[in-house]
Structure formats: structure tokens, C-alpha cells
Image (cartoon, helix red, strand yellow):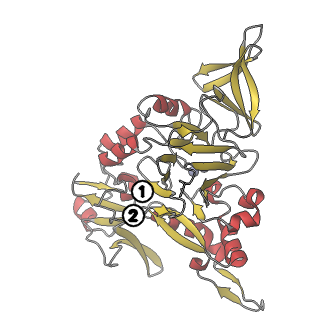
């Protein structure tokens, strides 16, 4: 039997930043052998794949609950339930699956009976099959209504029994915000928000079984990694592996080792609402969780974040300076050439509409092929990329080239050359594969 052609193919179905004029979101088709998965579904998958293409998907990976990443999830789930008579497999971490259920459930679980005369309830599981990536958490929050008021407490996820208030508790911020867990970490002797603090490998908060998804036929493995993912909502980066070919998808995040180091090194002072005694005894505290957290990241999370993408072609979001919840291009570019020289390539995703880069920029319709050597077909490619009006152009050195790239505080800028100096020539790119 000859070896199946290796590698992972990533076709861009949509790659628009939030608030972009073309109104699309983020979505990629991952192909490996006969396996086809969607990575995010913020762009309309029916538009490019057609209903047949959608029916052939093994599932959808979702990294976090921002709508530009899962806007079409309910449509996909409805189509699977009524078109293909099966539930849509959704690959996500436990926390992200919970968020997605909250977003999508109201649109799915109530409908009309076949004769149209009654309202019927259909379980969410008939639409969406949760395929867990990563481990299960040891504790979860449980709400109960007492006297018309919802109160929360931490319970053991396995047994459902309440956990000692000296070990874990619920924290609810201002009305309209979601409750958070607060856990006492014995190793540090500090109170932490466990969903932020721990990486998936840490047994203090996660039960074992850091689950991956794998296809026996194609050998494609999908793994969630939380460590480098820092964006606000529950989120995880995704690692795709097939043999020695490795592609990492950052989700939306802040790639900033300096910031990450501060998160792991800085001890914060608790601002307790009352006495220490009443704090330790409380099941639930009604203050913003940030006042009680004594450290944001564990050192183990920092270590894992710094090496998470080693050996992979990295698909990473990039933005201009000033962005808080995305990665500043200069930081990423420095990482890709410095500490993260162990990466096998970098492709920018989710960039603003007008953007210039020394790394390939993803655009709708482009296909990237990841092999064990890195990104295929890039070495003889352009020296820089420029995105404008929803199109991506490649820049190559040329005698008759009329453009140059300027390095400015605000990022790279494309300039039009005056005079006869040879510069860069700009050509439309449709397919980088
Ligand atoms: Zn996001
Ligand atoms: Zn996004």
C-alpha cells in the first residue's frame, strides 16, 4: 500500500475582521486525505461548499463564542438535523461548548409539531453533538433559586457535591454578567480564576484526559491548547497534526510574551468585600472576580504558551498597535523571527481591512498547504503582502515596481514610489497553494 499523500490543506472560506465592510466572518475548510472539517463557521459555509459539501463535513471546530467565529452554527445544526438527519458534531472545549449552547439553544430547541398545531421541545443534543476537546474541569458552578434570587456555589463536577468554601467558590460580578469560579491553588497558596490560571495539563483543576479528535483514515488529529490563548471569552487555540505536518490556529488572541510573563509573575492584592473570615466561609461573593484573584496565569501556563506552536505553521490573527484583544503585528513578527523561530511559517488571519505584512495574509478563496517542511509554495512567493478592499496582493521585487514598504510606529505602510527607483510590484493573489 502506498503512503497516502501527507499534509493538511486549509482553504479560506472567510477571513474578515469584526466590523468589516464585507460583513463576513471567519471560517476555514480543513482537508486531510478524505477528511473535511470546518474550522470556525463565521462565514457562510453553504455559499462556497453548497449543501452537498456541508453534508460531507466531519464536524465543525469552534474556538470561542464571538459571533464572527460561529455565526452559522445554528444554520448548520438545522441543516444537519432536517437535511441529513443527524446531529452536527461540534468540536470545542468544555467551556466553549457551554458558551455555544447558551448562544444557539434558543434558536433550536423549540419548534412546531409536524401538523403545525403544537409547540414542541427538541433536545439540543438532537442538533448538536458535543465532541469535547481538552479535559474536563474538576469543579463547576451550580445555580439555585432561593426566594426568587439565583445564588451560585461551586460543586464537584463528578459527584455534584458542594466543595468546601476554603477550596472553591462562586463569584458574581455586576448584574447581567456571568458568574465565575474562584479556586484556592494549594501550590501557590493563592486564589485564582481557574479557567484563566491553569493550562489543560494541570491536574489541580482539570481531570485527566486531555482529549483530541482523530480520524483513523486520514490520520488527522485535532487538539485544543488553551495556554497561548488570551482574548477575554473562554477560548482555545487549535493544533492540527497529520504525521509530521503541523498547523496551529491561534483563534483570536494576544500573542505577547512580555504581557504573559507579567500575568504569571505578578502577585495581585485581594480586595475583600468584608473580613477574611467571612470571605473564607462564603459560598458566593458578589464582587467582580478581578478583585479576588491573586494571580492571573500559572507559570506552567506561561511555559506552555511559549512553546505551544513549536514546529507548526501558525495561522495567527494580527492587528494594529492599540488593539487590546488581538495581537499587535510587530509583536508577532518579532516572535516569528526570534523566540519562535521554531515555527515553520506564519500566516496572518483576521487582519484589518487595510494591512501590509511581511508574512502571507489569508484572504477568502486562498488555499494553504501545510507539509512536514512547512508552508508549501511560499519560498518562491512574494516578499510582502498587502490587503485592501477585500483583496490580498503579493509584492515582488521588480525593476518596474512602483511600491515600497515603510516601517512606521503604526505598523507597515505601503507607499507609492516617485521617480525611477526600482521597487516592489503588486499583483493580485487568489491562491497561495
Ligand atoms: Zn474573538
Ligand atoms: Zn474574531
User: Does the image show residue 31?
Assistant: yes
Instruction: In this rendered view, identify the residue nearer to me: 1 or 95.
Output: 1
Image point (71%, 59%), residue name: 45
Query: To which quarter of the image does residue 404 belong?
Result: top right
User: What residue is rendered at 66% in x and 38% in y?
Assistant: 352
Residue 77 spot, x, y in % from top left: 65, 71
Q: Position of residue 367 (x, y in %)?
A: 67, 45
Q: CA distance from mark 2 to mark 1?
A: 27 Å
Q: Is residue 432 left or right of residue 373?
A: right
Q: On screen, 159 above or below 131?
A: below
Q: Which mark is residue 288?
A: 1
Residue at the far front: name it.
1
Evaluate whether residue 102 shows in this view: no
Q: Secondary structure at mark 1?
A: loop
Q: Residue at x 22, y 63 (%)?
A: 277
Of marks 2 and 1, the one in the foreground: 2
Q: Which residue is mark 2?
A: 135
**Along the horizontal axis of the image, is 209 left or right of 253?**
left
Q: Is residue 126 above or below residue 268?
A: below
The numbered dot on residue 372 is none
Q: Is mark 1 within 8 Å of ligand 1?
A: no
Residue 29 in the image: above or below residue 393:
below
Amino acid at each position: 500500500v502506498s503512503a497516502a499523500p501527507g499534509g493538511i490543506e486549509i482553504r479560506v472560506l472567510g477571513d474578515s475582521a469584526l466590523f468589516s465592510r464585507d460583513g463576513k466572518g471567519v471560517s476555514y475548510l480543513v482537508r486531510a486525505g478524505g477528511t473535511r472539517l470546518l474550522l470556525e463557521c463565521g462565514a457562510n459555509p453553504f455559499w462556497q461548499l453548497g449543501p452537498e459539501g456541508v453534508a460531507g463535513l466531519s464536524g465543525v471546530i469552534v474556538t470561542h463564542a464571538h459571533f464572527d467565529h460561529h455565526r452559522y452554527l445554528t444554520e448548520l445544526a438545522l441543516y444537519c438535523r432536517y437535511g441529513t438527519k443527524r446531529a452536527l458534531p461540534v468540536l470545542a472545549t468544555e467551556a466553549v461548548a457551554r458558551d455555544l449552547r447558551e448562544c444557539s439553544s434558543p434558536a433550536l430547541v423549540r419548534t412546531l409539531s409536524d401538523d403545525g398545531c403544537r409547540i414542541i421541545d427538541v433536545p439540543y443534543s438532537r442538533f448538536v453533538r458535543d465532541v469535547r476537546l481538552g479535559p474536563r474541569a474538576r469543579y463547576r458552578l451550580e445555580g439555585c433559586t432561593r426566594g426568587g434570587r439565583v445564588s451560585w456555589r461551586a460543586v464537584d463536577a463528578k459527584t455534584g457535591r458542594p466543595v468546601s468554601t476554603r477550596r472553591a467558590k462562586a463569584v458574581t460580578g455586576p448584574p447581567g454578567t456571568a458568574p465565575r469560579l474562584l479556586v484556592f491553588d494549594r501550590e501557590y497558596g493563592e486564589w485564582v480564576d481557574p479557567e484563566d490560571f491553569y493550562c489543560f495539563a494541570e491536574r489541580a483543576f482539570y481531570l485527566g484526559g486531555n482529549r483530541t479528535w482523530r480520524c483513523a483514515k486520514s490520520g488527522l488529529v485535532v487538539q485544543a491548547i488553551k495556554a497561548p490563548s488570551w482574548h477575554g471569552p473562554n477560548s482555545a487555540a487549535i493544533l492540527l497534526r497529520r504525521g509530521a505536518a503541523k498547523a496551529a490556529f491561534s483563534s483570536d488572541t494576544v500573542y505577547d510574551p512580555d504581557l504573559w510573563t507579567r500575568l504569571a509573575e505578578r502577585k495581585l492584592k485581594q480586595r475583600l468585600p468584608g473580613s477574611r473570615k467571612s470571605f473564607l466561609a462564603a459560598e458566593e461573593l458578589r464582587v467582580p472576580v478581578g478583585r479576588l484573584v491573586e494571580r492571573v496565569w500559572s507559570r506552567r501556563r506561561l511555559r506552555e504558551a511559549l512553546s505551544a506552536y513549536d514546529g507548526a505553521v501558525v495561522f495567527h490573527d494580527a492587528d494594529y498597535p492599540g488593539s487590546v484583544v488581538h495581537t499587535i503585528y510587530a509583536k508577532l513578527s518579532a516572535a516569528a523571527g526570534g523566540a519562535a523561530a521554531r515555527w515553520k511559517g506564519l500566516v496572518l488571519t483576521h487582519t484589518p481591512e487595510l494591512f501590509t505584512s511581511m508574512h502571507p495574509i489569508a484572504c477568502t478563496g486562498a488555499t494553504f498547504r501545510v507539509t512536514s517542511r512547512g508552508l508549501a509554495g511560499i519560498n518562491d512567493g512574494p516578499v510582502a503582502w498587502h490587503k485592501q478592499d477585500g483583496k490580498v496582493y503579493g509584492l515582488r521585487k521588480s525593476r518596474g515596481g512602483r511600491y515600497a514598504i515603510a516601517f512606521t510606529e503604526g505598523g507597515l505602510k505601503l507607499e507609492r514610489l516617485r521617480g525611477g527607483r526600482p521597487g516592489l510590484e503588486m499583483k493580485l493573489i487568489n491562491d497561495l497553494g
